[in-house]
Image (tube, rainbow, N blue to C red):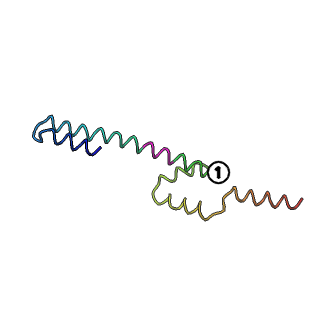
Amino acid sequence: MISQLLFVSLLADANSDAATNAVAGTFAAFGVVGLLVGIALLILSLWINWTIAAKAGYSGALSLLMLIPLVNIIIILMFAFSEWPIQRELREARARGTQT
């Protein structure tokens, strides 16, 4: 990608309006592609976090808190060091199974 930018800038005369428009258009195209890739990665990240939270027994909406700076660190620490609801349910089910 960078080589294409260099190629366009080397072929065009730096003082002409056509060269300036060509370089500006190239940067704009890369900006749009970068924006679309960024949005796609954000959606993928939210989907992954939603799935992890749901499998752990928490509400999947906790993944939306991952978008807030500093709150996302607290959520990760909560996932790492608290007892998950699914683990609590499993422990209770095993306790009921041994009592009967």
> Extreme top residue here?
18
**Residue at image point 81% right, 61% down:** 95
Q: Does the magenta stretch include residue 41?
A: yes
The residue that disc 1 covers is 55
Tell me which amino acid carries mark 1: Lys
Where in the figure is residue 49, as x and y percent of width and height?
55, 50
Quarter holding the C terminus is bottom right
Where in the figure is residue 66, as x and y percent of width and height?
50, 53
Q: How many marks?
A: 1
Mark 1 secondary-structure assignment: helix
**Residue at image point 45% right, 57% down:** 69
Q: Is residue 3 left or right of residue 57?
A: left
Q: Quadrant of residue 19?
A: top left
Quarter holding the N terminus is top left
Q: Quadrant of residue 6?
A: top left
Q: In this view, does 27 lie to the left or right of 37?
A: left
**Residue at image point 25% right, 39% down:** 26
Q: Does the magenta stretch include residue 42?
A: yes
> Extreme right residue here?
100
> Extreme bottom residue here?
81
* 74 relative to 62, above or below: below
**Residue at image point 24% right, 37% down:** 25
Residue range (magenta): 39-45
Mark 1 residue crowding within 10 angstroms, few (<14) / some (14–19) / many (20+):
some
Q: Please, what is the dominant secondary structure of the magenta stretch?
A: helix
Where in the figure is residue 12, as x and y percent of width and height?
14, 38
* 44 relative to 25, above or below: below
* 19 relative to 64, above or below: above
Q: In this view, does 48 lie to the left or right of 94?
A: left
Where in the figure is residue 85, as x and y percent of width and height?
68, 57
